[in-house]
């Protein structure tokens, strides 16, 4: 049996692979700590559960319009007005089966073969792979001097005649970097001037720390016509801890949205009406859970950074948002995949290799778990890597001895 050349070239998801490995070890009774997960541990909002349950009780579960049910589109419009200070029409909105599918559908709508998409590193692992799946060319912009914040000068250097779009994700997965308002303004003005699509992946926008204020990209957009190249992606998975519901959305000009709906109609037809109804409940319900999650994550971040600072040779940039940090482990290992395997084998700690995000020698560590997991996980990593640590450690009920250099 053979598969297509394209399928052969698409990389396996490292996060899903590591999740499976961790699950197998846990099934064997191993005391695995997962610092690679991107799922908050807080409960799904009650308003979402009640809305979902009420819809199920009707036993009237049918297809919906491709662009989404009217109630959800209305809720997204209200969210956009409150969060972005921007009034949009229903014709600007399309609901997708998760923000990941929104990325795929948007790129399928705007890309021709060999079109280039500029992606600053560090980047979410799926961006380059989705571009390649659509026969486009991902153009990666590496940061200078270990910084995570992109520079517009570096982006301008790689813009060419085949450049079709630029993807920005702030707060950023995997680094937690929050892009400045000045940078976003410069990017919007540059893309409007050059006629380049600017795709803003705002999935983590409510999970920012240290008193930072949300930046609305619409504050800097001058083109409000159906020629606007600004596209916004968002969803319920992160801010409401509703990762399993798979509901995201896009906001774009009416021409793009009409074409996008046609693409989606031939792809998944529509997201589940039950899950869309749950999303309405979340967006229209009590919002205190979002702030509670944000505060929990900020506290967890502080704990993780404090623990990582106990290493003498790890460079860590404090994240301004999300669930993640991206410390530099090159003083110990240059190969991040090998380092992940080593830490899983020796310390039973799951991490994600930085090379998958365009940052070799780094590891993505998640702090959306418990404080206990954060402190114990970093303690095990330190024991496995730092020769100044004690030679012996308890992992679960077993005493482990470091017998390697």
Image: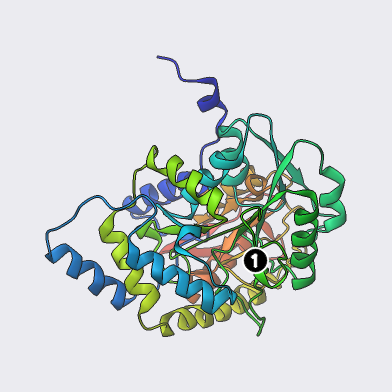
Dividing the image into 4 quarters, which one contains the N terminus? Answer: top left
- Name the residue rendered at 51%, 27% in the picture: 7
Side (left or right) of 105 relative to 162? left
Q: Position of residue 305 (x, y in %)?
A: 66, 73
**As displayed, is residue 102 above or below residue 75?**
above
Q: Position of residue 338 (x, y in %)?
A: 63, 43
On the image, which quarter does residue 61 sit in?
Answer: bottom left
Q: Position of residue 306 (x, y in %)?
A: 66, 77
Pointer 1 local density, CA inside 10 Å: few below 14, some 14–19, many at least 20: many
Residue 252 visible (yes or no): yes
Q: Position of residue 232 (x, y in %)?
A: 58, 60
Q: Which color scheme is applied?
A: rainbow
- Name the residue rendered at 76%, 54% in the picture: 191
Using the image as rendered, state which of residue 110 and residue 369 is in the foreground.
110
- Name the residue rendered at 78%, 61% in the picture: 189
On the image, which quarter does residue 112 sit in?
Answer: top right
On the image, which quarter does residue 222 sit in?
Answer: bottom right
**As displayed, is residue 217 above or below residue 160?**
below
**Outermost residue toward the front?**
225
Q: Label 1: state its secondary structure.
A: loop
**Outermost residue toward the top?**
1
Residue 345 visible (yes or no): no
Q: Which residue is mark 1?
A: 176
Using the image as rendered, state which of residue 168 and residue 367 is in the foreground.
168
């Amino acid at each position: 049996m053979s598969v297509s050349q394209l399928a052969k070239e698409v990389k396996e998801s490292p996060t899903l692979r590591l999740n499976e490995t961790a699950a197998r070890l846990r099934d064997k009774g191993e005391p695995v700590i997962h610092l690679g997960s991107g799922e908050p541990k807080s409960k799904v909002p009650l308003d979402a559960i009640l809305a979902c349950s009420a819809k199920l009780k009707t036993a009237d579960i049918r297809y919906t319009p491709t662009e989404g049910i009217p109630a959800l589109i209305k809720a997204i419009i209200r969210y956009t007005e409150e969060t972005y200070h921007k009034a949009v029409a229903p014709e600007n909105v399309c609901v997708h089966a998760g923000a990941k599918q929104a990325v795929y559908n948007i790129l399928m709508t705007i890309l021709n073969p060999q079109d280039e998409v500029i992606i600053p590193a560090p980047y979410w692992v799926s961006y380059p792979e989705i571009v390649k799946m659509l026969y486009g060319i991902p153009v990666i912009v590496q940061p200078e001097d270990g910084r995570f914040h992109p520079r517009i000068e570096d982006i301008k250097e790689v813009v060419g005649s085949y450049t079709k779009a630029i993807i920005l994700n702030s707060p950023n997965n995997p680094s937690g970097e929050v892009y400045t308002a000045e940078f976003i303004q410069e990017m919007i003005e540059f893309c409007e001037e050059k006629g380049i699509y600017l795709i803003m992946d705002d999935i983590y926008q409510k999970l920012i720390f240290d008193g930072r204020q949300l930046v609305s990209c619409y504050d800097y957009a001058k083109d409000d016509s159906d020629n606007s190249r600004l596209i916004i992606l968002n969803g319920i998975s992160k801010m409401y801890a509703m990762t399993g519901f798979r509901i995201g959305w896009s906001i774009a000009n009416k021409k793009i949205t009409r074409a996008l709906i046609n693409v989606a109609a031939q792809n998944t037809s529509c997201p589940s009406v039950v899950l869309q109804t749950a999303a309405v409940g979340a967006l229209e319900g009590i919002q205190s859970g979002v702030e509670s999650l944000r505060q929990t994550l900020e506290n967890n971040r502080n704990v993780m950074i404090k623990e990582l600072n106990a290493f003498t040779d790890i460079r860590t940039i404090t994240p301004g948002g999300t669930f993640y940090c991206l410390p530099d482990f090159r003083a110990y290992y240059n190969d991040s995949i090998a380092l992940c395997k080593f830490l899983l084998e020796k310390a039973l700690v799951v991490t994600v290799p930085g090379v998958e995000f365009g940052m070799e020698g780094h590891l993505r560590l998640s702090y959306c778990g418990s404080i206990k997991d954060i402190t114990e996980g970093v303690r095990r990593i330190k024991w496995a890597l730092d020769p100044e640590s004690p030679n012996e450690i308890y992992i679960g009920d077993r005493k482990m001895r470091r017998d390697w250099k």
